[in-house]
Amino acid sequence: LSPWKPSDFNIKIMLLRRNPEVVLKAFYDTDNICLRPVSDMFKRLLARIQEDMQKHCATASKINHLKIGQIVGCKFRADDLYYRAKILEMDDDRALVFFIDYGEMDSVDKKELKFLSADLKKFPGLCLKCGLRNCIKNPNSQAVNTLLMSLLSKEVEMKVSFAELLQDGVD
């Protein structure tokens, strides 16, 4: 795998030790694959963030002045729970968000976004976006899509090695 530059979305990410065990959380093509560590420490951190998110967003105010790049609380339609998300794009009524701990993107009603406290924003995103190295750039490759779908649906734990680590200057 070759790490993707989080500077594309200017997202702080959690640094991983060498050859971490991860699960595939989302993929868009061979250059956009989202992984999340499965160590006990990451699982505890994610559980703590999620518990705090639900408590906070139950009473948090809606945001009057949204801006691109802002980290917000966003309800995920599939389960009606709140997750940390970064606003990528906006129009009059909707925002495209990236769920920083899961790697998913969604277009949501801007009225559903909630203000987050500094405590909920202090942890970097727990999902690492990567790309497959030396993979033929064919986004419609049935074999690659089938493999990635299988890994995604079964949440297969795997060890990865990074060909190179890119520094993006995100603080």
Image (spheres, grey):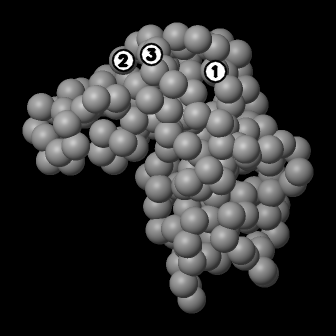
Can residue 114 be seen here? The reply is yes
Describe residue 110's horizontal placement relative to residue 45 as left or right: left
User: What type is the residue that disc 2 sits on?
Assistant: Val
Per the rendering, the mark at residue 156 is 2
Can residue 47 be seen here? The reply is no
Q: Secondary structure at mark 1?
A: loop
Residue 113, relative to residue 38: is it above or below? below
Q: Secondary structure at mark 3?
A: loop
Task: State the image coordinates of residue 58 (x, y, percent, origin top left).
Answer: 76, 57
The earlier-in-sequence mark between 2 and 1 is 1
> Spatial distance from mark 1 to mark 3, Cα to Cα?
11 Å
Q: Residue at x 54, y 84 (%)?
A: 91
**Which image quadrant for residue 37?**
top right
Q: Which residue does the numbered mark 1 point to in the structure image?
A: 16
Q: Which residue does the numbered mark 3 point to in the structure image?
A: 160
Q: Residues within 10 Å of mark 2 (few under 14, many from 20)?
A: few
Task: State the image coordinates of residue 123 (x, y, percent, origin top left).
Answer: 78, 38
* Residue nearest the viewer, comparing 44 with 100: 100
User: What type is the residue that disc 3 sits on?
Assistant: Val
Q: Residues within 10 Å of mark 1 (few under 14, many from 20)?
A: few
Q: Residue at x 57, y 65 (%)?
A: 88
* Residue nearest the viewer, comparing 101 with 14: 14
Numbered-mark total: 3
Label 1 with label 3: CB-CB less than 8 Å: no
Label 3 with label 2: CB-CB less than 8 Å: no
Label 2 with label 1: CB-CB less than 8 Å: no
**Which image quadrant for residue 113?**
bottom right
User: What type is the residue that disc 1 sits on?
Assistant: Leu
